[in-house]
Amino acid sequence: MKRLLTFILLSFGAQLIYAQANTMVDLEYVKAAQKRGAILLDVRSSKDYLEGHIPGAINIGDLGTVLRDPNREDYIDLAEINAIFNKAGLDINKEVISYGARGNPYAYFGLFTIQYFGGKQGKVFHDGIDGWADAGLPIEKNPSTLPPVAVKLVPQPQLVVSNEEMRKLYNNKSVQVIDARTVNEYKGNDIRAIRGGHIPGALSIPYEQNWKDPQTASKLAKKEVKNNAGMSLKNKEELNQLYTNLDPNKETVVYCQSGVRASETATVLQNLGFKKVKIYDSSWLGWASNLASPVADETYLNVGLMNARMSAMQNKINELEAALKASKN
């Protein structure tokens, strides 16, 4: 009896330490959840939301803008988030399904946010509004609202890795680290912080590799494809193959620039059966800004070159404004 009780307690503890699996849902699940009263959270901008959303879905604006401090790319004050959620009727103790556009990592950030603040029934609908529309289901344009709630958010810091913890873990052979950024960011060619490069020992697996066609975003920009169908997730067999060199029983830490793209990869791994997945909360911004942190393929931001380009751009703007003014005279 004592052994059974110990097993139950350990199992329960594991659920508290790591985010839940079976959180990625398909269209049929969403349709059924909608009927039973689950909360549908549209993470897109208010403009996109009002242009068409799943009937009954609520929206608090672009999640990345509303809940994050742009200077730190981290959450705003807890009390502010709590007030936003309560006003919107976003009760994290209920089933909440986060969605955006197909492939939008902020849908996964929405799921992570629900989990981080104590929600146990969070889900994510990867195909989002596009999958819903492709199925010919009704689209609503009027905003949906829920009655306000009074729920206290309780952060779960055990779901993330802090800067201090990461500096202890990165060269630990029992921990595997995944860099979910682009290959150019990983190699230090695309610098988005004070330094470029990657955490020593981290494996480069860009989050777009989870998609059927990882080049879809680039193809859309070049108008080589007409829609974002290629951003649909690979099937389970293909995803298992993508992560075949990883050990699902090892502790796995995922990072990107600020934790958003990492949330998609972390969720995919959890749903593939990886048992110990965490997100490095500060991600590359936190690591690169501490000059004591070692960096592989290290490069530095060329401030002089950046200033020169900005100056040239400003000169061009001045020329265009002068030409426009002259044309009016």
Image (tube, rainbow, N blue to C red):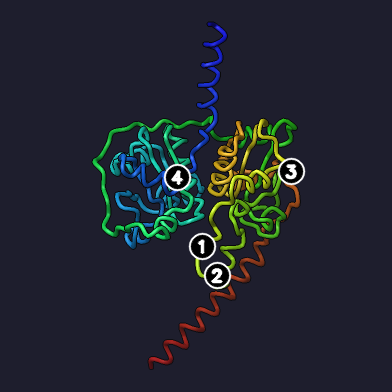
In this view, the mark in front (3 or 2): 2
Q: Quadrant location of the C terminus?
A: bottom left
Picture quadrant of residue 78 = top left
Q: What is the distance, in whole Å, between disc 2 and disc 1 at their CAs? A: 8 Å
The type of residue carrying mark 4 is: Gly
Q: Position of residue 235 (x, y in %)?
A: 58, 49
> Neighbour class for label 3 at 10 Å: few (<14), some, many (≥20)?
some
Residue denoted by label 2: 225
Crowd band around label 1 with a 10 angstrom C-alpha radius: few (<14), some (14–19), many (20+): some
Q: Which type of secondary structure does the marked residue at label 3 adopt?
A: loop
Q: CA distance from mark 3 to mark 2?
A: 36 Å
**Front label number (3 vs 4):** 4
Quarter residue 119 falls in? top left
At x 56% / y 49%, what residue is drawn?
A: 261
Image-based side of 121 in relation to 260, left or right: left
Type of the residue with mark 3: Pro
Determine crowd level at label 4: few under 14, some 14-19, many 20+ residues with C-alpha closer than 10 A: many
Q: Are marks 3 and 4 in contact (CB under 8 Å)?
A: no
Query: Horizontally, is 72 left or right of 76 in the view?
Result: right
Viewer-closest of 177 and 99: 99
Amino acid type of the residue that numbered disc 1 sits on in the rendered structure: Asn
Q: Earlier in the sequence, mark 4 or mark 2?
A: 4
In this rendering, which labeled residue sits more in front, label 1 or label 4?
1
Q: Please name the residue that numbered disc 3 is placed on.
A: 200
Res 110 label: 4
SS for dot 2: loop
Residue named by callout 1: 228
Residue 51: % across, % down: 34, 63
Q: Residue at x 44, y 56 (%)?
A: 131
Q: Residue at x 66, y 65 (%)?
A: 304
Q: Are marks 2 and 1 in contact (CB under 8 Å)?
A: yes
Kind of residue sitting beneath label 2 = Val
